[in-house]
Image (cartoon, coloured by chain):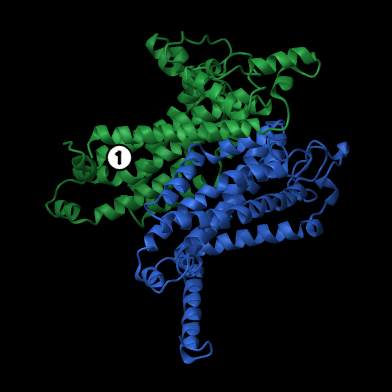
Chain colours: A green, B blue
């Protein structure tokens, strides 16, 4: 199979999953007992006004027709008005998503560094103390949910030691940089505002670390066993017996094949942080997409709920696609079979 | 076929006993697995016996005693008291009860149908049945389970029953996927082929030939999942979309307590540690079961 064919196949299945997901979540949102139009206007609105809104939202149509109307709008980038912000949901998502993207990005960076370092250390020193420490850390990481880490960190580092800020993306009085990418750390670097950058970074550490720690343990364990397994293989033993330096073996030959299983899991985990972000953003009062998601859910804002779930689905699918392509690229058996070099 | 009381059956019985004995030996020789079993045992027993062992039964419900509010941990109140003067230790033990109830209800509903769907998909490989079932699971697994459960719980009114419903609706595809891959691995084995050749029915092949071979991985997953389902339930109620106060649900207690941080840490930290305790226990136990069942 060529790369083009592989990509086309993956994108078709991605589109299929998203279409199915939209039907699923649309059905869930519309079987709710209650009247979205009445919910939107409140109990005191006149019957005529509710009726008019019902017509405007196509709520007087049968359910499949309503879905087709929604799909038509969604394909042109409109997700319907939010009952929470009174704007189009797609506009809300565009505004709030960068904050979450930044958080997840930093969590991914912390996680990648931590998991690979720990895993490699444990794997190369199997049975010695780096291995034992990694094992204990991995149990802690698996058993402690992200939101518990978040509460601990907030209590410890913001309240008891006041080293790091406890909520928001920037301190009061620090002006946000002009929006270019929406990621404050990047925008402030582009505009050359170092103080803002440092402030934003300080705000990012605790929430992104809470998200990262939740996934780090399992990935470190996977990296460890993969390193141990590959270290025993003939090509590594051969190089060791030729006296090639540990460093060269590690970085040139051992790391690449050993990281393939880790990266596959990492993709799933990073996509999964979008779910943990719902809790962590709530704790750190992070003005992001996940906090927006919690708010629309608490208000039963149907367009908001459908939009948020679809956006998570899209992000999930895109991250998995990127990871699969990356893994296919890393693995020469797959790469060559696709006619690449 | 030998008679049921024939010598062959007795030998088979002895062999099976020997396998169980070996598995148990393997399980108990790993101290972490035994620790997991110990933790799970304390959780299960205190959940079942909760009404009889908690020191302050009135603290479970809508009880108020403001003279006792925000007492730090002491011998009288091991975990301290919350803003209403309720004993947090009693509420946490009761929280185990709600958590286990949630996991038991959800898993006892999803495991069987999810597994059967997966076995069917794995048995009918390369047919439309496989495609239909597996593409359906892809859709459900297209977003993290917490997100879909939150969405379902939010369109219904938030309470314990609805969060059970929401999690149940989202949890079956994991079993379908696991059963599918385990079934695919054995479906071409000679014993399945033999059963097909002598004309066994679908029911016999699925439940007598395939099922015993995939039960190990399903059982391991069920054990691990108890912890995860409890975590999802706690997350729902932490966000206000699950069990509501004054229900002594662990997630609700963490969220309620977090309002008083950083002044009073104990109403948040003890229920949070209880969640960690449960997840740790079921994870260690699940790992132990997996290791004990593997390669014997």
Relative horizontal placement of residue B186, taking residue A175 as reference (left or right): left
Q: Secondary structure at mark 1?
A: helix
Place residue B237 in its image quadrant.
Answer: top right
Q: Is residue A156 visible?
A: no
Chain identity of mark 1: A
Q: Quadrant of the C terminus of chain B?
A: bottom left
Q: Position of residue A251 (x, y in %)?
A: 23, 41
Q: Residue A101: percent from the left, percent from the top? A: 46, 25
Where is residue A65 drawn, in percent x and y?
58, 25
What residue is shown at x 59% (from left), y 24% (from top)? A66
| Residue holding disc 1 | A327
Q: Residue at x 45, y 85 (%)?
A: B1
- Count neighbours of disc 1 (C-alpha within 10 A) and say few if under 14, some if 14 to 19, many if 20 or more: many
Measuring 72% from the left and 43% from the top, which residue is drawn there? B160
Q: Nearer the viewer, residue A218 or A149?
A: A218
Location of residue A157 with respect to B28 vertically, above or below = above
Vertical relation: A85 (above or below) B205: above
Residue at coordinates 73% horizontally, 40% vertically from top-left? B159
Residue B15 is situated, as x and y percent measured from the top left of the image, at: 46, 82
């Amino acid at each position: 199979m060529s790369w083009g064919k592989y990509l086309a196949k993956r994108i078709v299945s991605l589109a299929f999953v998203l279409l199915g997901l939209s039907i699923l979540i649309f059905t869930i949102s519309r079987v709710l007992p209650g009247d979205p139009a009445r919910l939107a206007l409140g109990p005191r609105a006149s019957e005529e006004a509710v009726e008019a809104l019902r017509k405007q939202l196509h709520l007087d149509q049968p359910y499949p027709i309503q879905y087709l109307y929604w799909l038509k709008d969604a394909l042109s980038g409109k997700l319907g008005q939010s009952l929470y912000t009174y704007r189009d949901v797609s506009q809300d998502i565009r505004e709030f998503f960068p904050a979450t993207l930044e958080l997840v990005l930093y969590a991914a960076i912390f996680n990648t560094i931590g998991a690979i370092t720990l895993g490699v250390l444990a794997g190369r020193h199997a049975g010695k103390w780096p291995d034992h420490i990694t094992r204990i850390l991995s149990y802690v990481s698996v058993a402690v949910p992200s939101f518990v880490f978040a509460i601990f960190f907030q209590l410890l580092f913001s309240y008891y030691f006041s080293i790091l800020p406890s909520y928001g993306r920037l301190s009061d009085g620090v002006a946000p940089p002009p929006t270019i990418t929406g990621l404050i750390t990047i925008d402030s670097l582009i505009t050359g505002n170092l103080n803002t950058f440092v402030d934003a970074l300080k705000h990012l550490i605790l929430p992104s670390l809470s998200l990262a720690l939740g996934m780090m343990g399992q990935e470190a364990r996977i990296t460890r066993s993969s390193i141990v397994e590959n270290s025993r293989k003939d090509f590594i033993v051969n190089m060791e017996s030729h006296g090639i330096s540990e460093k060269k073996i590690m970085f040139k030959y051992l790391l690449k094949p050993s990281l393939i299983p880790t990266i596959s899991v990492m993709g799933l985990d990073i996509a999964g942080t979008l779910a943990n972000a719902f809790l962590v953003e709530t704790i750190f009062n992070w003005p992001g997409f996940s906090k927006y998601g919690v708010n629309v859910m608490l208000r039963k804002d149907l367009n908001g709920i459908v939009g948020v779930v679809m956006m998570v689905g899209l992000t999930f699918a895109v991250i998995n696609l990127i990871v699969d392509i990356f893994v296919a690229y890393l693995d020469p058996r797959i790469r060559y079979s696709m006619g690449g070099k | 076929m030998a008679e049921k009381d024939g010598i062959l059956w007795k030998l088979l019985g002895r062999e099976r006993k020997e396998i169980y004995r070996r598995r148990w030996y393997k399980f108990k020789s790993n101290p972490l697995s035994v620790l997991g079993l110990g933790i799970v045992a304390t959780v299960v027993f205190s959940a079942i016996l909760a009404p009889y062992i908690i020191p302050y039964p009135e603290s479970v419900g809508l009880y108020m005693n403001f003279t006792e509010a925000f007492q730090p941990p002491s011998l009288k109140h091991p975990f301290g008291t919350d803003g209403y003067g309720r004993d947090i230790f009693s509420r946490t033990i009761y929280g185990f009860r709600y958590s286990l109830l949630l996991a038991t209800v959800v898993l006892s509903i999803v495991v069987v149908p999810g597994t059967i769907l997966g076995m069917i998909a794995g048995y009918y490989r390369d047919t439309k049945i496989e495609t239909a079932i597996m593409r359906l699971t892809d859709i459900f697994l297209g977003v993290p389970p917490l997100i879909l459960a939150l969405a379902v719980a939010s369109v219904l009114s938030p309470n314990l029953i609805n969060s059970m419903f929401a999690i149940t609706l989202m949890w079956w595809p994991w079993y379908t996927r696991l059963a599918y891959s385990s079934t695919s691995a054995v479906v071409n084995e000679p014993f399945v082929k033999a059963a097909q050749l002598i004309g066994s029915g679908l029911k016999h092949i699925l439940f007598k030939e395939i099922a015993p071979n995939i039960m190990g991985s399903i059982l391991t997953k069920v054990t691990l999942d108890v912890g995860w389902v409890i975590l999802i339930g706690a997350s729902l109620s932490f966000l206000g979309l699950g069990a509501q106060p004054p229900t002594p649900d662990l997630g609700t207690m963490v969220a309620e307590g977090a309002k008083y941080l950083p002044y009073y840490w104990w109403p948040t930290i003890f229920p949070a540690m209880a969640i960690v305790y449960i997840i740790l226990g079921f994870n260690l136990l699940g790992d132990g079961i997996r290791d004990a069942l593997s390669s014997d």
